[in-house]
Image (cartoon, rainbow, N blue to C red):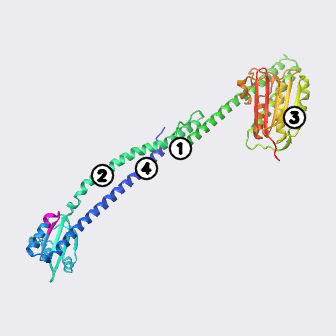
Amino acid sequence: MRKSVLKQRVWMSFILLMSLTIIAIIVLTYFLYEKFYVEKQISLLQYHGQAVATQYNQFSKSEFQDQITWLDNVLEANVIYTTDPMLLSGGLPFEVEIEETLITFEERQVLLDGETLTLIREHPRFAQDIVAVVTPIMGLNGLEGVLFLYMPLATVYEPFESIRYMLIGFVILTIIIVSVVTRKITDYFIRPIEKMIEVTNQMADGDFSKRVNVNRRDELGQLAKSFNRMSSSLDEVETKRREFLSNVSHELRTPISLMKGYTEAFEEQVIPQEKYVSTMKNETAYIGRLVHDLLDLAQLEGDTYPITKAPLPFAQVVEEVVQKFEWHVKEKNITIQKELDEEIIVEGDEDRISQVISNILSNAIRYSNEHGTIFVRLFTKDNEAVLVIKDEGVGIPREEVDKITERFYRVNKGRTRKEGGTGLGLAIVQQIAKLHNGRLTIKSDVGQGTEVSVILPKYMN
């Protein structure tokens, strides 16, 4: 499978976002740290300059010079003291051969007003940037001297060199760690989606057996479970569809083969006309019943099939259906014992309820032995109407009871159509019961007969 575009986009977006955030934080931290550190150095120079300037009138000139010398030795900054500010504006003190100035004429005027100067500029002799604080020393006669405290900016920035390399290394290491962690996180969230895409492509090709193996309890885990349930449902539907087509083909193949064979035999005058007509009639009737039941079941399984519900006297509907089978009962000398609660009312479609009773009773008569008895009971249990039809016929193996409501399922695989219907009757019964919010239960054992119960909600006024 080709590389996941979604995974790449998520991974790259996350890495880019995290990297930009980290770099921005580091740059901001570095900038603020540098800014505050430089300002601290300037404040320190201003403090010492002001402290010395205030002591000018407290010492003799030699003692004051000693204070200047001491300050120059103690501070990292260089200290220049001069009583002639013109030296600063005309050149370096004692460096008359250098024409560049430390301060401009305009700045000297500021000093004459007694204001302190803060400068950041290139040193005229050493060709390097300096940060300087120029403090005027004011006396009775105005400006009597100037303290010039300065230090190279390289000295100020020197502590940042090691920090800069550490920050660069930290950024690189952080990006590597974030990349690895992000890839893991991306795989954690995107991998289940990739698996679903892979399974979906296989499902599109007709393979519904694949599942997504995701053992998680988050939303993606729930999505994977829902996806697997959908796959299972589609797999089941596909299996039933294939079985249905196979069963329909099988059910139609036999009568069509018989009709073709009898037609050829009749054309060759091998069988008499009466036999041919009788066979054609029976097989045509069977195909008609099969098509009718298939259409009936397809309609019942549709979501839009109309069910016209109305209050029905359940016992009366049962009596009417039993009367329809009077001739079949007499033909096999079967006795029907009825025990019906006349008070039971259900809400349902009368035609469909009659169809349910007819299908069950028809099976009971078909598989009952001659001179047998069929018990029909209608009673109330747990506020539900329960119709039980029990025969004393051949019965069904217990292990196959749960399967007999499936389409075309026959207990006796070799049973001919003379012994039964289309194999769709109980499937139709179960679907009608569901449409009436009811259910179907079956109990049976070989040689013990079969008991079929239809449970429907009672009608509540």
Residue marked by disc 1: 218
Residue kind at label 1, given as amino acid type: Asp
User: How many other residues sit within 10 Å of disc 1, few (<14), some (14-19) or many (≥20)?
Assistant: few
Where residue 440 sits, quadrant-wise, is: top right
Q: Which residue is mark 4?
A: 14
The first of marks 1 and 2 along the sequence is: 2
Among the two numbered marks 3 and 1 on one chain, the one whose residue lies closer to the N terminus: 1
Question: Which numbered circle lies on residue 168?
Answer: 2
- Relative to 385, say whether 78 is above or below: below
* Residue name at image x 14 percent, y 74 percent: 88
Q: 339 or 283, which is in the foreground?
A: 339
Q: Which residue is mark 3?
A: 340
Which numbered disc covers residue 423? none
Q: How many residues crowd mark 4 within 10 Å: few (<14), some (14–19), many (20+)?
A: some
Name the element at disc 4: helix
What's the residue type where badge 3 is placed?
Leu
Read off the magenta span: 71-79
* Residue 436 visible here: yes
Q: How much space separates mark 4 and mark 3, taking CA atoms?
A: 74 Å
Q: How far across and down, in percent of the image, does residue 306 sit?
A: 78, 44
SS at badge 2: helix
Mark 3 nearby-residue class (10 Å; few <14, some 14–19, many ≥20)? some
Cα distance in 3D space between marks 3 and 1 = 54 Å
